[in-house]
Amino acid sequence: MPLLDIKNLTLEIDTPLGWIKALDKINLSIDSSEVRALVGESGSGKSLVVKSIVGALPDRWKVTADRMNWKGRDLLSMSDSQRRAITRSEMSVVLQNPATSLDPSATLQEQIEESISDSQLDRGWFWQRRQQRRLIATQQLHKVGIRDHDVCLASYPHQVAEDISQKFALAMALVSNPKLLIADNPTMGMETTTKIQVLRLLAKLNKTRELSILFVSHDLLAISAMADTMTVLYCGQTVESGKMSQLKRRPLHPYTKALLDSAPSFRRDLPPKAALSSLDGTIPTLQHLPIGCRLGPRCPRAQKECVKMPDVRRIHEHYYACHFPLHRDKT
Amino acid sequence: MLIYLGRRLNLLLITLLILCIASYILAFLFPGDPLTNLSGTPSPSDDQAQQLRLMYALDEGALAGFWQYLKLTLVGEWGLSLSSQNPIFDDICQFLPASIELSLYAMFVSLLVGIPLGIIAGLNHRRISDMGILSVSLVGFSLPVFWLALLLILIFALQWGGLPMSGRVSLLYDIPHQTGFILLDIIMSNVANKQQVLLDALNHLILPTLSLSIVTSSLVIRLTRRSVINVMASDYIKAAFAKGLSRPQVFWRHGMKNALLPIMPQLAMQFTVLLTNAMIVEVIFSWPGIGEWLIQAIYQRDFPAIRGGMLAVSALVVIVTISVDLLIRMIYPLSKKQIHAQV
């Protein structure tokens, strides 16, 4: 049974122009000890997917789904406190912009100790618990690569550097020993060396503690080394998902191909001053979403049929939603 | 912190200095003889005039004159009132506490009412309770304070008759003037039936405090509501929800502090609005405070008193604003980022 299983997740946002589907029938599933990459250019709704999974959305937005199961239990229909219990102990999230997702008026120590649940402390007297919490927090900070833990724990969020607060957010997510880590762009803006460090840590946790990771990023190079499976998002629609290796070798959806091509390559035979390949145009804004397949206006293979949303098709473990997939030309 | 403290004190001193300059210039701008305006002696004889000119150093140029004036102001020689020939400084010391007392109680009441209501409205953004509180606060905000005070007198003092309409305490009781704060004075004095006197003083306080605090509470409600809405929409609140904390936990641990601390200076600014309103209310309720005294002075063209009253009230406002700022600086970590003093 998959750890997290999402089918047809739709998120509607109330705008002055009426209700707009910011996410349109997203499918996503994560098995235990799987690393799934969620990719797509900025504005494709990756962070919205993350926020709807953990329920950190404004009350007035409507989330509907045919299925949104955590270990077989429906997240949307369960009570608030049950859902909180799951997000508290089994699921952790690193939101985008860790610096702004830390409370500016509390020290980092207070914030990380808040994430340590009582069940992680061995039964000591209540005065020993403080020390235990502190110890757990310190160890976790060392794991993510923050060396001077005393300084870090005593500071307020505005006093630490951006990459420290990024690492700190990661430590805060990992400190509760979750089954699933949802990391929304955890390496954004980091130096390459620190980035490798963090990725290595995540890979290690994945191997040793069987941590499943939903890795949200547009850094294809970082992801491709690590992820087992990948889901490609465009403009709030899932366009393709499947095994990483398969997707890389033979993408079926034109968008996936464009995304893979746009990653800078260091091939030997790259001619000097060769143009970087990219799709024309930009991602449409929420107010101007095209009907049907939302890639339509930008798609090199678009035809008349594309004004209807293509059904999700499946070849073994490889799902795609396109009328005219690559490599499978109709006869 | 020390640097910040230095900057703040610097600001305080400079502002007070400017106030002194303004009050000194006023003495020359008011109609009549500057000497009379400064000293408060209505028509000095030649000898007296000579003495006063020496005392105020009027013949040695503006700078020396101002220096002399500053020294006299600092030691409490603020001249005499033209109408009563009392020393102005003593008058102010007697009347200012009454105003401060009234404003403090009104401030206390409006914070007590305004902050919880504002929080409730902010947490229920765009729901019925929010709309209700907001519209009530809009009404309270739009009522002119003098009209409100008269209305309260009409309803509670004249028609119902349960509450007294003027003064601080019934004329039956004679409370010796010690601190100027009526409740403190009563507690410190040895009048018979202390409880009864205290109750009477509280009864006198109700109407002025109410009429003052209605306007301020609605301002406080609006400030708090806006701040709570902003904070609850911020990333760290969402992150706290994502951590799996419950709504009350999120609000008490992360929302409350962040919502209230940044608006503290604005809340403190309400004190100055309050003080202005208090002057009007004092006149209506014949509350023996600085406002009533100042307005009497204006009616009687008592220029030394106007000058002194203005100096005292504005100095009070400046001191209150800056001390609240320092206090916030001490307890709110995010404000430590800014170094420069601002008003």
Image (cartoon, rainbow, N blue to C red):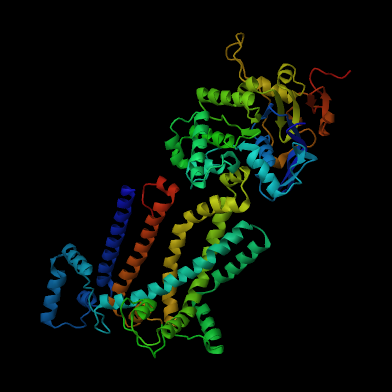
Where residue B150 sits: x, y (%)?
51, 82
Quadrant position of the C terminus of chain A in the picture: top right
Where residue A46 sits: x, y (%)?
67, 35
Q: Quadrant of residue B37?
A: bottom left
Where residue A115 sits: x, y (%)?
57, 41
Q: Residue at x 77, y 37 (%)?
A: A72
Locate residue B295 relative to residue B32 in the image: left or right: right
Q: Nearer the viewer, residue B221 or A330?
A: B221
Q: Would residue A323 be visible to someone looking at this image?
A: no
Q: Is residue B63 above or below residue B152?
A: above
Q: Residue at x 42, y 52 (%)?
A: B331
Locate residue B340 relative to residue B144 in the image: left or right: left
Q: Nearer the viewer, residue B286 or A243?
A: A243
Q: How many marks?
A: 0
Locate residue A66 relative to residue B325 in the image: left or right: right
Residue ranking furthest to the bottom: B172
Q: Would residue B42 be visible to someone looking at this image?
A: yes
Where residue A246 sits: x, y (%)?
74, 18
Residue ranking furthest to the top: A269
Q: Residue at x 60, y 41 (%)?
A: A119
Q: Is residue B337 above or below residue A146?
A: below
Residue ranking furthest to the right: A331
Quadrant position of the N terminus of chain A in the picture: top right
Q: Nearer the viewer, residue B317 or A277?
A: B317
Q: Quadrant of residue B199?
A: bottom left
Q: Quadrant of residue B39?
A: bottom left
